[in-house]
Amino acid sequence: MNYLQAVQEINELFPDFESELNTTKTPNSYSVIRNFTERIKNMIRQNDSNLLFRSLQKIDKMYINGDTLLKNAIENTFIYSLDNYTAFCSKEYRQKIFSHISSDLKNSYSRQIYSYGI
């Protein structure tokens, strides 16, 4: 899956997503994941669990089926910022969010969190 296919996946949840990307000068894997991550961040803040969990399933699917660029964008944008977005959530809500993330993404998250400074 490349970034264009990822846009189609995200459009299933957010029909206006593609038009939002048109404001980006050069759409690529990083801009797609950055915009999707911003939406996920807003869902976390607004406690929009239903759409959040469906979005997490999409990002898992993109990570598992994505090409190298898409995977790197997910690791360096979504995974990198996940800790910041969930820092002020209740412990229960944070655990619920992480329970909806695949083991592949959890492993990537653990590598980033625990390998800092190495």
Image (spheres, rainbow, N blue to C red):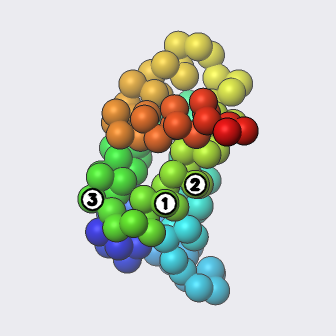
> Which quadrant holds residue 76?
bottom right
> Which quadrant holds residue 13?
bottom left
**Does residue 5 lie above or below 99 as drawn?**
below
Q: Residue 76: which disc?
A: 2
As helix, strand or loop, the secondary structure at mark 1 comes to helix
Task: Provide the residue designation for mark 3.
Answer: 65
Marks 1 and 2: in contact by CB < 8 Å?
Answer: yes
Residue flagged by tag 2: what amino acid is it?
A: Asn
Kindly tell me whether residue 75 is visible in this rendering: yes
Task: Provide the residue designation for mark 1.
Answer: 72
Residue flagged by tag 1: what amino acid is it?
A: Asn
Residue flagged by tag 3: what amino acid is it?
A: Asn
**Does residue 57 lie above or below 37 as drawn?**
above
Residue 88 x, y percent position in the rendering: 71, 24
As helix, strand or loop, the secondary structure at mark 2 comes to helix
Give the side of residue 37 with respect to residue 61, left or right: right
